[in-house]
Image: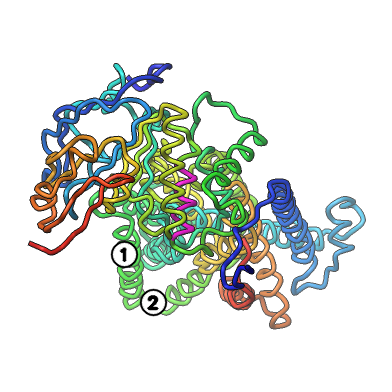
Amino acid sequence: MTQPHCDLSGASLSITGLSTGYGGKAIVSGLDLAPIEPGAVVSLLGPNAAGKTTLLRSLAGLQPATGSVRLGDQELLSLSLAGHARIVTYMPQSLPQRVALTVLEGVIGAIRASPVGDGNLSDGDIVDRALEVIERVGIGHLAMSGLNHLSGGQRQLASLAQALVREPRVLLLDEPISALDLHYQLRVMKLVRQLAKERGMIVLMVLHDLAIAARWSDRVVLLAGGQVVADGTPEQAITAQVLADVYRVQARVEPGPSGLNIAIEDVL
Amino acid sequence: MNTPSHIAAPPSFNRQDTLNAYHRTGRRRALIVTVLGLLCVIAFALDISTGPSSLPLADVWAGLFAPDQISSPQMTIIRDVRLPYALMAILVGAALSLAGAEMQTILNNPLASPFTLGVSSAASFGAAVAIVLGVSLPFIPGDWMIPINAFIAAFASVLMLEGLARNRASGVEGVVLFGIALVFTFNALVALIQFVASQEALSQLVFWSMGSLGRATWGNLGVLALVVAAVLPFSMQAANAMTALRLGEDRARSFGIDVKRLRFFSLLRISALAATAVAFVGTIGFIGLVGPHIARLMLGEDHRFLLPASMLTGALIMSLASVGSKILVPGVLLPVGIVTSMIGVPVFLILILRKPERV
């Protein structure tokens, strides 16, 4: 089956027994995740080489995996790349540096690559839609700048716009804010959250900043060695004990006025 | 209180201005492609009106449209020399440059071209086998032996690149390194054949490997025209996918593009274009590398514009090189492969060294 069912709005994403790896080496094995509700923003946290990127890539259909990934009653693992592309969009960690396209052309390119949503958009619609996303991400003033002339942070925002413009049901973001300044870190998290709620879009993102994850996610999943170590609301998942187990750090975690107050005190 | 001047105001954005700028860029690109096309026509006219025999444009024109007004030797020059050479220049330039543009994109390497990744060297090897050893496929008529051998070797080299590209473990860098290894391997094999070659065969081989339009006939022109015409629609069909591939392989795949398939069919197109062109004119090194770069510097990497512009740029350089090969040393027809570099390098350097590139 390569054609996805038409209506997947309101469907939740469930992962059972997912295994994947490279060259015979298992990175993630038998991973289960409780269903993710539409509109939910889920942060994936964990140390380096925990399998976060590998998990996202297998959910995006970019690498072979076994097990089951279902959106509603649609099995995603059996879809072709084109079938995946109608439902899921993956934003990789980096955007190539020497690309002689403008920010706007990059976003337009993301729409033209394969049919998006209901398919036939006119040239004018495509440009309008691309400009709107660029504006919402906060780089409208850079729309006509070359991607090869941007700073790392600006390039990351352009990369995010390319992913958002496809309006997927499931959005997978691999470290979307790692190169951003404070203003844009916050702006991106707010925007992603807002879009998730507006569209009922499921967002899974890899983050490194615990405080930001705690403040802006509905749910936090901590991965280590390809296994789920903790999963729940930020308060449930991020505890001093979990941080000690996963990151080998000594931390103090207290509820604060806006999310959790997390202080990392020493390495263990 | 005044805001200190070092605190930047939030950047302003005007949607209508941006839209206008976008449409201006689109019009500018269409204009550049049109101008390139016109320049090709002018270069072509220049090309058919220059040559060792003094036959100015007016006579050539008469030969084309009122053949009864000029003498039959003049007619022969026009029909068998001027026209096929000039058309071959345009076609070879377009074919090699399109092949180079696709190769640079699908291998994600600005140094990729049929010449740098061994296709031309393989063709030289095939030609050397025919010229020096007289070996070819059975039932090939004598004057087609060299191009057929060159084609087979060039095609085989791209198929090897293709096989490697399909093997996921080696990656794109592996393909590029393998191509460079091919260059050295085939060059060594050609040197080995040269070492055992007779004096006469050696000079024929050296001349072949310089690249010359002197082998243009209406027959092989027709073959190359057919190949270019057959390949171009498929290239243009893949233009959006290639543009998306420039945004990164994982990203393009997540946008639904089967990159392996794209790469496979693109390499097939490249092998047809490059192998046919090189088989008929010999080694012409510079066009496939520089044509796409010049086009990219002028109008960016939206492949719907880049691919046709690369073809036109390649055709233009090649056509000018053909003119140059006839007038640089009066009375002598230089091998065009030498002239392409002499004309192309300065153009290329001017483009690289001028102000920061526009997109």
The location of residue B151, given as percent across then percent down, is: 44, 54
Label 1 element class: helix
Q: Is residue A203 above or below residue B205?
A: above
Residue ID for mark 1: B177
Majority secondary structure in the magenta region: helix
Q: Is residue A177 magenta?
A: no
Relative placement, left or right, of A174 versus B215 is: left
- Residue B198's tag is 2
The quadrant the C terminus of chain A occupies is: bottom left
Residue at image point 70% right, 62% down: B81
Query: Is residue B141 in view?
Result: no
Which quarter of the figure has residue B348? bottom right
Q: Is residue B63 above or below residue B192?
A: above
Amino acid, disc 1: Leu
Along the line of sight, which residue is nearer the eye, A150 or B27?
A150
- Residue A143's tag is none
The location of residue B157, given as percent across then percent down, is: 35, 56
Task: Tell me the distance, in whole angstroms, between the alpha carbons under discs 2 and 1.
Answer: 34 Å
Q: Is residue A160 magenta?
A: yes
Q: Is residue A7 above or below residue B31?
A: above
Query: Furthest residue to the right?
Result: B69
Q: Chain of mark 2?
A: B
The location of residue B234, given as percent across then percent down, is: 53, 39
Callout 2: 10 Å neighbours few (<14), some, many (20+)?
few
Relative placement, left or right, of A70 versus B356 is: left
Mark 2 and mark 1, same subunit? yes
Query: Furthest residue to the bottom?
Result: B329
Q: Which residues are magenta?
A: A153-163
Which quarter of the figure has residue A58? top left
Which quarter of the figure has residue B109? bottom left
Residue at image point 44% right, 59% down: A153
